[in-house]
């Protein structure tokens, strides 16, 4: 992409005082790991690609199922049976050929996750189970890499961020202290389609904020009730007894 084409493509962002050419170049130089390419990972990957993030690492070992298509908009009907990482990569490359894509189509063990966390600027948790979320939190703390986390089920969603670079910032385990939580899934409980788009877009927005240097959600949890169309803001203090981040 030539300099002229680059400026034209991102002109609407470059016009913004909080972005400008300097901020847009930051996005171009950024590397982001997205773990989970389902309902949340779909809008996150697509918006970060469109916004001009330079490299996305797309991690998911699952395959596209017909029941996914109600909400996982990065995949198409013709992708049924394909690995989600590969399907998502095809969509991302079609949206923006300038974005470099790395596919991780296997189950990451903790050592893999730690290595990936140490090689990127940001982690985005789009998974649907607590064990993986706790592992991402641990990797974030160990590598000093910011983490944007979200969840969505039924009609309810939440989004927050954790930045270990910020003094006295809480971590995911400050929000959920117990590691033996059993999580309900969309397969068990159901989920309304646009909810994951709303929450995933919030994740993408906070990811851009963090990459530009002005993250907003560390220490804050936004809760969304899609049926009532209401947002609630909850302050999340650091837990001095937290087993994950106390020092």
Image (cartoon, helix red, strand yellow):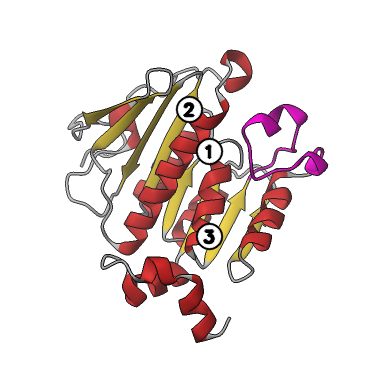
Q: Name the disc covering residue 50, or none.
A: 3
Q: Which residue is drawn at 30% across and 38% down?
A: 171
CB-based contact (under 8 Å), mark 1 and mark 2:
yes
Using the rendered image of the protein, determine whether residue 111 is visible from the camera's viewpoint: no
Out of 55 and 175, give the one closest to the viewer.
Answer: 55
Query: What is the C-alpha distance between the residues marked 1 and 2?
Result: 8 Å
Query: What is the C-alpha distance between the residues marked 3 and 1?
Result: 16 Å
Graded by Cα atoms within 10 Å as few (under 14), some (14 to 19) or many (20 or more), the crowding at tag 2 reads many
Q: What element carries label 1?
A: loop
Graded by Cα atoms within 10 Å as few (under 14), some (14 to 19) or many (20 or more), the crowding at tag 3 reads some
Picture quarter containing residue 238?
A: top left
Q: Residue at x 63, y 41 (%)?
A: 73
| Dot placed on the residue nearer the N-terminal end, 3 or 2 | 3
Q: Which residue is drawn at 44% across and 49% down?
A: 204
Q: Name the residue under label 2.
A: 152
Q: Is 59 situated above or below 175?
A: below
Picture quarter containing residue 212?
A: bottom left
Q: Is 193 situated above or below 207?
A: above
| Dot placed on the residue nearer the N-terminal end, 3 or 1 | 1
Q: Name the residue under label 1.
A: 40
How many numbered marks are there?
3
- Span highlighted in magenta in the image: 60-81
């Amino acid at each position: 992409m030539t300099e002229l084409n680059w400026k034209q493509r991102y002109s609407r962002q470059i016009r913004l005082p909080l972005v400008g050419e300097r901020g847009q170049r930051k996005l171009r130089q950024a590397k982001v790991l997205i773990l989970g390419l389902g309902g949340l990972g779909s809008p996150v990957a697509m918006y970060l690609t469109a916004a001009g993030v330079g490299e996305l690492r797309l991690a998911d070992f699952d395959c596209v199922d017909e029941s996914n298509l109600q909400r996982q908009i990065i995949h198409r009907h013709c992708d049924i049976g394909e690995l989600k990482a590969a399907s998502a990569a095809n969509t991302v490359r079609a949206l923006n050929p300038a974005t470099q894509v790395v596919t991780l189509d296997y189950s990451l063990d903790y050592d893999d996750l730690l290595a990936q966390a140490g090689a990127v600027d940001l982690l985005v948790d789009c998974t649907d189970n607590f064990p993986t979320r706790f592992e991402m939190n641990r990797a974030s703390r160990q590598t000093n890499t910011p983490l944007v986390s979200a969840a969505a089920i039924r009609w309810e969603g939440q989004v927050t961020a954790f930045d270990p670079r910020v003094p006295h910032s809480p971590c995911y385990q400050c929000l959920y202290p117990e590691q033996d939580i059993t999580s309900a899934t969309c397969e068990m409980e159901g989920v309304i389609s646009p909810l994951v788009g709303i929450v995933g877009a919030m994740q993408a927005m906070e990811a851009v904020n963090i990459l530009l240097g002005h993250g907003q959600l560390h220490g804050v949890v936004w809760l969304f009730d899609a049926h009532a169309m209401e947002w609630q803001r909850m302050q999340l203090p650091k837990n001095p007894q937290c087993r994950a981040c106390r020092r």
